[in-house]
Amino acid sequence: MPEWWENEFLQVKNNKLYLEGIPAEEIARQEGTPLYVYSLPQIKRKYQELVEALSPLKPLTYHIHYALKANANQPLLETLLSCGVGIDAVSPGEVKKALEVGFPAEKIFFTGTSLSSEDLRFALSIPGLYLILDAVELLPQLKALTREISSDLPLKLGFRWNPGIGQGFNA
């Protein structure tokens, strides 16, 4: 009987660990250790499961965005791009990485916190990028920068809002 954690990617056969049907020992011998192993087909399957789980919400629309800070592995990002996933980036460097991989600006949410004038200028320089602010206090600064750089690009703007309900740090 398979273990609870076994799946199409991760299995035990004859007391040996297999990753996508390949003995883990063989992968370690070939690639060296320590090492991270990702299953791109498993990532695609899990994405499809998520899409199917959200399908009862139709006709409502939704967007799936991957938090780039979790893992910026190039093949992983290329796989997510091929699935149609968007990116949630928290720094100009992450936005640049997403663009380099091929994500269109329209599918990138730049949700940096405590953004500097330089960060805001960067965001304003990329047509189609969604800029998500965490403080309404940034609006006057953003307006001034827009005038300063004579930007008439349509700005896609969102806000992270904390209603202050609850206890602890995030309240």
Image: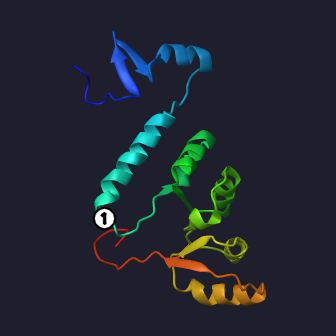
- Residue neighbourhood size for the residue with mark 1, other residues' Cα within 10 Å, grouped as few (<14), some (14–19), many (≥20): few
Q: Please give left or right for residue 21 compared with residue 127 in the image.
A: left
Q: Nearer the viewer, residue 98 or 128?
A: 128
**Image position, residue 123 (x, y; %):** 67, 72
Q: Please give left or right for residue 158 compared with residue 145 in the image.
A: left
**Image position, residue 164 (x, y; %):** 34, 78
Q: Mark 1 = which residue?
A: 57
User: Residue at the location (62% across, 70% down)?
Assistant: 129
Q: Please give left or right for residue 45 compared with residue 70 in the image.
A: left
Q: Nearer the viewer, residue 91 or 59?
A: 59
User: Residue at the location (39% across, 26% down)?
Assistant: 10
Inspect the image, locate mark 1, and give the three-letter code of the amino acid beneath it.
Answer: Leu
Residue 72 visible, this orientation = no
17 relative to 148, above or below:
above
User: Residue at the location (55% across, 53% down)?
Assistant: 69
**Image position, residue 96 (x, y; %):** 69, 58
Image quarter where the N terminus lies is top left
SS at mark 1 in the image:
helix
Residue 125 visible, this orientation = yes
Q: Quadrant of residue 46?
A: top left
User: Residue at the location (51% across, 49% down)?
Assistant: 83
